[in-house]
Image (spheres, rainbow, N blue to C red):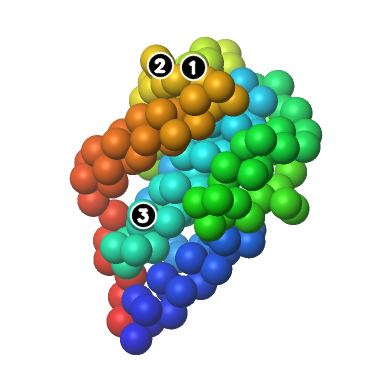
Amino acid sequence: MRSLIVAILAAAAAASGASPPRDSAAAKVVFVCAHGNVKSLIASEWLRRVAAERGLAVESVARGIDPENPVPAAIAEHLRGDGIDVSSYVARGLAPVDAAGAARLVLIGVEPPAWVAGRGLSVDRWDGIPPASERYAASRDAMRARIETLLGELKPPKATR
């Protein structure tokens, strides 16, 4: 029953743009792109959705190197078409507190800040993702494929009952 509740809450959080409830056993993934309002946001929302569908305990956040607000209208509209509402989303810059306890830091087309070095973080680079502003579906699908691989590597615990 608890796994169903966690999945429902995570799905509702993803749909609302809010962070899902934090499970102490959840694997945390931090997605980082240039502005924190396009690629990292898309990846974070899709990771939440796929993890919730599978009943996996995963926490996901989107951050930017140089955050910009708001989410571009075309991106918000595409996400809405995918059933994801980001109308209240506010992009934030990557900070050391975001990486604390992260199972993975995923850099999407950006270089890590200098403070990342020496922290023992597991860092992935997702280069070559198509520009979402020009080719949303191709960008989303490329990130979803990598999310599938990432979830297999994380092997987060199933939500407890």
Q: In the rendered view, does 40 fall on the left or right side of 51?
A: right
Cα separation, mark 1 vs mark 2, equals: 5 Å
In the image, residue 17 sits, relative to residue 79, either above or below, namely below
Dot 3 or dot 2, earlier in sequence? 3
Marks 3/1 in contact by CB < 8 Å: the verdict is no
- Percent from the top left, x then y, of residue 1? 34, 86
Q: Give the quarter of the image for residue 61.
A: top right
In the image, residue 137 sits, relative to residue 77, either above or below, namely above
Between 95 and 110, the one nearer to me in the picture: 110
Q: Secondary structure at mark 3?
A: helix
Q: Which mark is residue 3?
A: none
Q: Secondary structure at mark 1?
A: loop
Dot 1 or dot 2, earlier in sequence? 1
Which residue, given by chain and number where applicable, does mark 2 sit on?
127
Marks 1/2 in contact by CB < 8 Å: the verdict is yes
- Percent from the top left, x then y, of residue 153? 23, 41
Cα separation, mark 3 vs mark 1, equals: 22 Å
Dot 3 or dot 1, earlier in sequence? 3
- Percent from the top left, x then y, of residue 159? 33, 70
Q: Residues within 10 Å of mark 3 (few under 14, many from 20)?
A: some
Q: In the rendered view, does 87 fall on the left or right side of 40?
A: right
Kind of residue at badge 1: Gly
Q: Residues within 10 Å of mark 1 (few under 14, many from 20)?
A: some
Q: Residues within 10 Å of mark 2 (few under 14, many from 20)?
A: few
Q: Residue at x 53, y 57 (%)?
A: 83
Quarter of the figure with the C terminus: bottom left
Q: Residue at x 39, y 15 (%)?
A: 128
Which residue, given by chain and number where applicable, does mark 1 sit on?
109
Which residue, given by chain and number where applicable, does mark 3 sit on?
50
Cα separation, mark 3 vs mark 2, equals: 21 Å
- Percent from the top left, x then y, of residue 140? 43, 35
